[in-house]
Image (tube, rainbow, N blue to C red):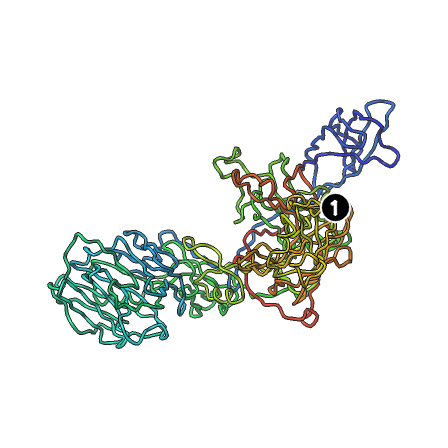
Amino acid sequence: MNIELKKINWAPGQSATEPQIMTLAVRKQVDSNYTVITDGLQVLSDGTIFNPPTIKGLDENTGYVFRVSNNNPAGGQIEMVFNTPQELTTTAVTKKYYHNSELIYAAPGGGFRDATLPPKVGAYYSLENTLADWFGNYTAAVLTGTPVWQKANDLIGMKISGTTDKIEMPSVNLPLFSSRYGLGVHFFVASADLPATGEWPLLSCETTTGNGVYIYVDAATKKVHWRQKNGNVTEEIISTNVINTDSWNKVVVFRASDIALSQLWLNYFNTFTGSFSIAGVYTVTTETDALLVGREAVSNSVATGGIFRNVYYTTVDLDNNIAGKYQDPPYPVGILENPADSQDKYRILRRNMIVLNNDRIVCTVPPDAPVGARKFYIENSSGVTAPVNIEILEMTKAAATLAINFATDTNAATLLQQQYFGMAKAWGGANGGVSPENVYLQDNTLVFEAHGDLYDGTLQGYNRDGSLKIHDIPQDPAFGEPWTKRVGAVISSKEYCGYGRYIVEAKLPLDIGVAPAFWTFHYGEVYPQDPRYEQLLAQGLHRQGSFGDGYYVVENNEIDIELPSHNSMYVFATTAEMITPNYNIVWAGEKVAVAEDPDPSKNGTWQLTNAAAPNLLSSWTKINNEVQLIYQPRKDNMKCNNWKGELGAGNGFTFGTDPFQDEFFAMLTSIGKNVWDGAFHEFRFDWYANRVEFFVDGQQVQVNTHFVPDVPGRWTVGLWFPSQPDPVKPWLVRPTGGWAGSVANWKYQKMFVKRISHEPFSDAVAGGTNRLVGETYPFDGYKNFE
C-alpha cells in the first residue's frame, strides 16, 4: 500500500513561522527502528508539504508512526500516528434474476430467427419494430403518412390509420409478379375499423390504372380477394372462409408456374373459388410499381385502422407445409426446467421475448414464472439448446433495520460484506464511473475516495456494463489508455428497501467537483414487446428512443440527496420571462434567478412567496443579487429529488405549448450552513407513500410531494462525478455542464462515513404499500465485498 503525505497538522501553538526543510522517517507502532523516507521535505508554515512524498510498501490495517524532524538542529520534531486503511477485496456477483428481469440466451450460430421463417428466397418484412428485410435480400420498407408501431394480442406490427398511409417495399416491384410468386401478410383489424362495404386493401402491386396484383378484404362479405388485372381482363380468386375481426389473420397466395394451379390460404384453410389464366397477367416489365401494404391505387379503397406484419414475397413453390409454417411461425420457447424434475417445465412464450435474433434471444422473466433454481434453454423447431443454470429470486424488501455504526460496531466489516455490494459501473457522462476499490475502512469510518482531474495513479474506472473503461474515442489524446480520472466510489444494499427512514452520518470532502449522494434506486427498462410497456405508458411515463433505433419506457424509482447544488430552479433572462412559463409544480420558497434584465436592479435571485399565483410578479421577492449557475454550486445547498421516470428537466414548468412531460422533480434546497466543513453531519430522508421529508442534522429542510416513488430500491451511498460531455471533445467535461463543479482540480478527495442505516416503516406509518417489481438488470455492475 502506498500513501501520499500532503500535510502536517501542527499541534496548537507549535506551527512554524516560516517554511522548513525536514526529514521524514517511518516505523510501525510495534517497532522501534525508523526508516528514513526523505531528508528534503519542504513544509510550508501552515503544514502543507510542497513536495509531498509517496510512502510505499505499507501494510494495510496497520498503525504507523511518522516522525518529521527539522533539519536545523535548533528545530524540533513531531510524531504522528497513522493507521493504514483496511482494504476490501471484491469478487464477482453471481448473476440472478427477478420477475421482469432481462434474461438472455446467447448461442452464436444458433439460427433462432431463421428457424421461424419460410425458405429464405425473396423478402420477409416482419414489421416488428424494424423495416428491414429479415432475409437480407431487399432494401428496407419505406413509410408514407403516419404509420406507427402497435401491439395487438401480444404481437407488434405497423398500424395504418387511413388511405393516405402506406408501407412500401420499393425493390419488390411489378415485374416480379409476371411469373411464379408467393405473397403473404399477417393482419389485425378491429371490428370497429372494418367498414360495412368496400375494399379493405392488404397488398397491392399495381399501376395507376389498376393493372397488376391486388389482395384485399371485401368488407361486406369479409372474404379475401386476390385479383390480377391486365387491361380489360380482371380475374379473382376468393377465399371461401372469412376473416376474424379483433384477432390476427394470415393470408398467403401462390401463383404457380402453371397459373391454373394457383392457390390461396386464409387462416390455414386452402379453400377458394375462382381461378387465373395467362390472359390476366400484366407483363409490361418497364413499369416498376412497388409492393404496397395497406393502400391500393384505385379510388374505392377504404383502408382504416389495420395492423400489418410478416409481409412475405417469394419465388419458391408453396405447398401446405411452407404455407403452414408461414401462417403459424414456429417461434422458439424459453424453457425453465426444474433441475429435480425434468417434467416440471415453465414455458416463456413469444410475448415475453423482446429480442429474437439468430444468435440471441432476450426475454423478460414473466411475473408468474417459478422462483428458485432452474435450467434455462431454448426449444424450437431445430431441437433444444444446451441448458444454462440460473436462479430466479422472489422479489422482497428489507423487513428489518439495516444499520452499521463504523465507530462502535466491532464487526462493521462483516456487516458491510453481508449487507452491501460495491458498485463497478458508470453513468453521468465523461467520467470513469465508480470503483469498489475506492471504498475501504480506516480509523473506524468507511471511506469513499474519489479521483479527480489531477489524479496520476493507475486505478482504472468502469463502463456502464461493468467492464473496465478505456479512452475509446480516436480523437482523444489518451485514446486506448485506461480511464483513471473522475472515478468515484459507491456502495449499494443487497436488499431492496422501501418506505422508511434513511440515515447517513458523513464528513464530506473539503473541495467540490464531486457529488456526495445518498439515494434509493430501482431501474426498469421496458420495450414494446414486453407486456408492461402499455401499463407504464398508462401510468403517465413517456416513450423514449426513436423510430429507427426502437422505442422503450424507463421506470426509474429513485429518491436522492445530492450535494453540492446551485439554488436556482432556472435562470431566466428577464423578470418578464420569469412570469411566463406554465408552472405545473411550484412551492413556496422556490428560487429562480434573473440574469439579463434591462433593469440591472432586477438581476439576482428571486424567491416565490405566493405559490398560488407564480405568473404574477408580485408573487416573487428578490432576495439578493446573486445568480447561481448550475456549474457554480455552493456548499450550503443540496438537491432533494424524487423520480418515477427519467425524462424532463425536473424543474416543474414548460414554456408555450410544450407539453409537460417531467417524470422527476429536483427541489434545490438551502441547508442554511456549509456542510463541507470537515465535521460530521447527519443526512436523512423519511420516505412515506405521499411524500419524502429531508433532514440535515435533525432539522427538516425540505418536503417533496411530487413523483414519490412506490417501488423499493437499493439503498445507495457514495461519491460520483456529474460530467456532462463537451459537445466537441466528449472525453472532456463541458465547462458549464458539471453541476457538482465544472472541474475537480485535485488528485483525490474523501468522504468519511461513521454510520449508515435504513429503518423500514410499517404500511400504517408509511400510509401505503410498496409495489414489489423486479429490476431489468438487478445485478449488473455490482461486486461482493470479501
Q: Residues within 10 Å of mark 1 (few under 14, many from 20)?
A: many
Instruction: Say which of 707 and 144 sits in front.
Output: 144
Placement of 728 over or under 325, stated as above or below = above
Q: Position of residue 751 (x, y in %)?
A: 71, 46
Residue at 85% across / 32% down in the picture? Answer: 15
The residue at which mark 1 appears reads as 676
Q: Position of residue 65 (x, y in %)?
A: 79, 36
Query: From where the camera sits, is residue 34 visible?
Result: yes
Instruction: Say which of 36 and 153 sits in front.
Output: 153
Query: From where the camera sits, is residue 121 visible?
Result: no
Instruction: Quarter of the image for the N terminus: give it.
Output: top right
Placement of 766 over or under 19, stated as above or below = below
Placement of 310 over or under 91, stated as above or below = below
- Quadrant position of residue 540: bottom right
Does dot 1 land on a helix, a strand or a loop? loop
Does residue 703 appear to the left or right of 289 in the view shown? right
**Residue type, label 1:** Trp
